[in-house]
Amino acid sequence: MRDPGHPDLAKATSTLGMLLYERGEYDEAVPVLEAAVQLHATRSPLSAELGAAVSELANAHFYAGNYDVADSLNQRALAIHTQVFGDRHPRVADDLINIGAVRFQRAEYTEAERYYREGLSIVEPWFGPDHFRTGMALTMLGRALVFQDRYPDATESLT
């Protein structure tokens, strides 16, 4: 039996939580991912692994419809990833886009646009204009613009 502080236990718990999440079993994934966050936090209060676990937990809450919890967790992941990687890293962009997605679900389209643009400003230089991640960020931005009735801007983003 492994020591409860062993890194393999945190990694295995994260993997199980992500498996449940990927299967669409969000309510089942949440407690497992919460345990993973606790295990990672015990090992290090500031690490890429903790940031990833917090992000996965935020995603599970988001897809379960728990937008307030997802928003808080995305903010926490953003703070961790910014400290670990700096403010121009794809993990930071993911967190910004996820915060934008929560705003979008709350019909806060102007705020969603702001976060999507900030995430896009990181993704596009990192991956280039033809990468699928850039395309995904542009699509999210375009959706926010459509919901603001800004069709010419949306068309520019989506083409």
Image (tube, helix red, strand yellow):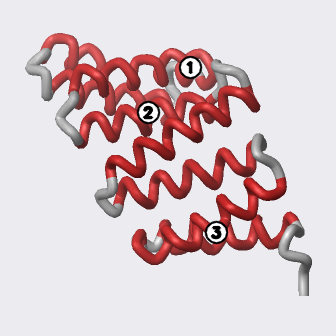
- As measured in the structure, the alpha-carbon distance from the residue carrying label 1 to the one carrying label 3 is 31 Å
Q: Which residue is mark 2?
A: 97
Name the secondary structure under disc 1: helix
Q: Amino acid at mark 2?
A: Ile
Q: Is residue 35 visible from the viewing direction of this image? A: yes
Locate residue 147: give its quadrant: top left
Q: Disc number at residue 122? A: 1
- Horizontal placement of 9 versus 60: left or right? right
Q: Earlier in the sequence, mark 1 or mark 2?
A: 2
Q: Decide which of 29, 38 is in the foreground and name it.
A: 38
Residue at the image position 63 percent from the left and 21 percent from the top: 126
Q: Which residue type does callout 1 highlight?
A: Ile
Q: From the image, state whether disc 3 or disc 2 is nearer to you.
A: 3
Residue at image mark 3? 35
Q: Residue furthest left?
A: 149
Identify which residue is drawn at 74% across, 54% down.
Answer: 41
Q: Residue at x 21, y 12 (%)?
A: 153
> In this rendering, would 91 be left or right of 86?
left
Quarter of the picture containing the C terminus is top left
